[in-house]
Amino acid sequence: MKTVKASEFKVKCLKLMDHVAETGETLVITKNGHPVAQLGPVTQLGPVASKPSTLFGLHRGQIRIKGDIVTPLDEAWEAEH
């Protein structure tokens, strides 16, 4: 993993971003000799970067239904009192 000083990164930011995009190499940005940030290639875009065309199936595999969600509970709601 290549390291770059923050001052050098500030001057060559766009060029270094292009280098990361082309090579897939991750850069560590240092300040006073200590690593403070990491610049790496995007491997997978999350929901913020790519908007789904439909919400159907958006949370597939993330939500679990426990128990019966169809049968009434036979309990009075607070709103009914």
Image (cartoon, rainbow, N blue to C red):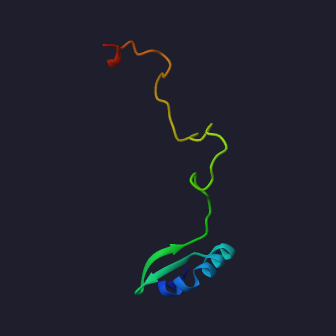
Where is residue 36, by image quadrant?
A: bottom left
Whether residue 17 sits left or right of residue 38 in the image: it is right
- Taking the spot 55% from the left edge, 86% from the top edge, the residue there is 11
Q: Position of residue 76 (x, y in %)?
A: 34, 14
Give coordinates of residue 61: x percent, y percent.
56, 40
Q: Position of residue 55 (x, y in %)?
A: 61, 39
Q: Nearer the viewer, residue 65 or 8?
A: 8
**Which residue lies most toward the right here?**
22
- Relative to 66, does residue 62 appear above or below in the rendering? below
Where is residue 26, by image quadrant? bottom right
Note whether 28 is above or below 73 in the view shown. below
- Residue visible at 48% across and 83% down in the picture: 6
- Image quarter in which the C terminus is found: top left
Where does residue 53 sit, x and y in percent of width and height?
A: 67, 44
Count of residue discs: 0
Residue visible at 56% across and 41% down in the picture: 59
- The quarter of the picture where the N terminus appears is bottom right
Residue drawn where x is 48% and y is 21% of the image: 68
